[in-house]
Image (tube, helix red, strand yellow):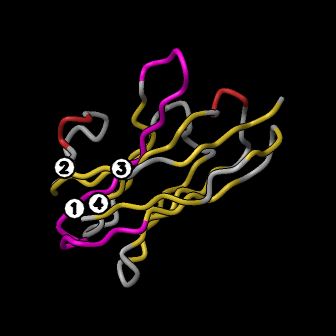
């Protein structure tokens, strides 16, 4: 089982990035894929999640209206489009896979598989 994130970078405030999470080794559409972030000195935060079977999406209030999660089931890949980025969005972003149905997407314990993370840095 593998989850591989990519797309992290250094960007200016107001900029955009698209993160990718490529999954392999499990039945993709049996799982919901979530994005979490961890910033130094802060608690980890569940950012967004998508049910790969029904396409239902979930967002933290802190990113609602700025981030968009989507899934390409043919490629076993989930994307996180991040617009209007702020310095507070600076963190390591991780994707994770948890079995459907999605219940509390923010609960880390419900996820079975995790990626290694990708760094997003937003400069002021």
Task: Describe the element under mark 2 as helix, strand or loop.
Answer: loop
Check disc 4 and report the residue beneath it. 51
Name the residue nearer the viewer: 106 or 6: 6
- Residue that appears at 56% across and 38% down: 63
- How many neighbours does mark 4 have within 10 angstroms: few (below 14), some (14-19), or many (20 or more)? many
State the CA–CA distance, disc 3 to disc 1. Answer: 10 Å
State the CA–CA distance, disc 4 to disc 1. Answer: 7 Å
The residues colored magenta run 22-43
Check disc 1 and report the residue beneath it. 31
Please indicate whether residue 2 sits to the left or right of residue 39 in the image.
left
Which label was assigned to residue 112?
2
- Residue that appears at 74% across and 37% down: 122
Check disc 3 and report the residue beneath it. 34
Of labels 2 and 3, earlier in sequence is 3
Name the residue nearer the viewer: 123 or 67: 123
**Quadrant into which the C terminus falls:** top right
Task: Describe the element under mark 3 as helix, strand or loop.
Answer: strand
State the CA–CA distance, disc 2 to disc 3. Answer: 11 Å
State the CA–CA distance, disc 4 to disc 2. Answer: 15 Å
Disc 2 and disc 3 in contact, CB within 8 angstroms: no
Q: Is residue 62 above or below residue 58?
A: above
Location of residue 116 in the rendering, given as x and y in whole percent from the top left corner: 41, 49
- How many neighbours does mark 3 have within 10 angstroms: few (below 14), some (14-19), or many (20 or more)? many
């Amino acid at each position: 089982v593998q989850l591989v994130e990519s797309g992290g970078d250094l960007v200016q405030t107001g900029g955009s990035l698209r993160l990718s999470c490529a999954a392999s080794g499990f039945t993709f559409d049996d799982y919901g894929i979530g994005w979490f972030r961890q910033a130094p000195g802060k608690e980890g935060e569940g950012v967004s999640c998508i049910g790969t079977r029904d396409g239902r999406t979930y967002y933290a209030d802190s990113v609602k209206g700025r981030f968009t999660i989507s899934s390409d089931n043919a490629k076993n890949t989930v994307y996180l489009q991040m617009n209007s980025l702020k310095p507070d969005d600076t963190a390591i972003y991780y994707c994770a896979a948890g079995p459907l149905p999605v219940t509390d997407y923010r609960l880390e314990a419900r996820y079975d598989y995790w990626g290694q993370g990708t760094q997003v840095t937003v400069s002021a």
